[in-house]
Amino acid sequence: MGKSRISKQPSHYPPLAFHLIRLGQILSSIVVASVLFFFIHHLEIEHYNIPWTFLLLLFVSLLTKLTIVTTSIFYHFRTLPPKLNLFSNLGLLVLWMLGFALLAWNLSGTLSHRCTTANWSNEAGIMVCRLYKALTAFAITGLTTTLCAVLLDLRTYRLTTHRGKYNPMMDIKHPFPISSPSNPHDPYQPPRDIPEFSHEITKPYKVQQTIEVQQFGYSAPSEQTTYDGAGSVHLHGAYGNGGAF
């Protein structure tokens, strides 16, 4: 017996924008995490305390990579819900904003200087200066791409909910529009504006067209011609009660 395959629903995301934004997220996360691992390693060797800014940025960069991998599995093998991706990117956006704000506040004096021997004394100091600026640049990239991901998720989510709106269909039992009654709380009040159909069978039967009966040169008008329902036509007039045909 063959294995049953689960059909994959088409994604609502635009492919080009979706993959470009996620590529920017993953690259910025890799660079930020790599620089922070380098700093943390040397700080531990020198027995310095690790700043909370480094720990926060390292956490958000690793969490971003984990989120990208997890959502990519959903995207390629099942279906990535825009609402789920929106919530995950919103959480990442808050962490990126907080980490970048702390980094910019701590490195405000360092980022305003050029990486030269006059400011950093030797080549090792120049390398540290460049790493600080690279960390700041890719932290901004991670923040920007995550913001773009949130906007894309929000647009896609609104698009999917708009397509899924319910439009009431015509009731086959009541194909004509029926307005609400004057008192909507009265269940026994018949609705108004119901189209009425006139049927001739609801009215007493009468001959619609003039029937001329010619007998002995006499033409009976339609007013003097009746139908008794038994297949006979009676004439009324100058000849008395008339005769049946």
Image: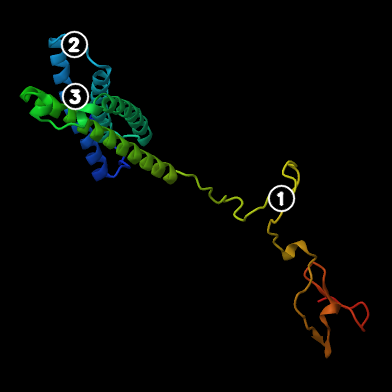
Q: Which mark is residue 191?
A: 1
Give the class, few, some or many, for how many residues have Cα within 10 Å of label 1's Cα (few <14, many ≥20): some
Name the residue nearer the viewer: 180 or 240. 180
Q: Position of residue 123 (x, y in %)?
A: 6, 25
**SS at mark 1 in the image:** loop
- Mark 3 and mark 1: Cα distance apart in space: 70 Å
From the image, tell me which residue sits under label 2.
Answer: 48
- Find residue 67 and report its image quarter: top left
Placement of the N terminus among the 4 image quadrants? top left
Q: Earlier in the sequence, mark 3 or mark 2?
A: 3
- Find residue 235 and report its image quarter: bottom right
Placement of the C terminus among the 4 image quadrants? bottom right
Name the residue nearer the viewer: 107 or 227. 107
Give the class, few, some or many, for how many residues have Cα within 10 Å of label 2's Cα (few <14, many ≥20): few
Q: Position of residue 65 (x, y in %)?
A: 23, 27
Q: Position of residue 198 (x, y in %)?
A: 72, 63
Q: Residue at the spot x=10%, y=27% of the render?
A: 126
**SS at mark 2 in the image:** loop
Name the residue nearer the viewer: 89 or 220. 89
Establish if 93 lies above or below 207. Answer: above
Q: Which mark is residue 33?
A: 3
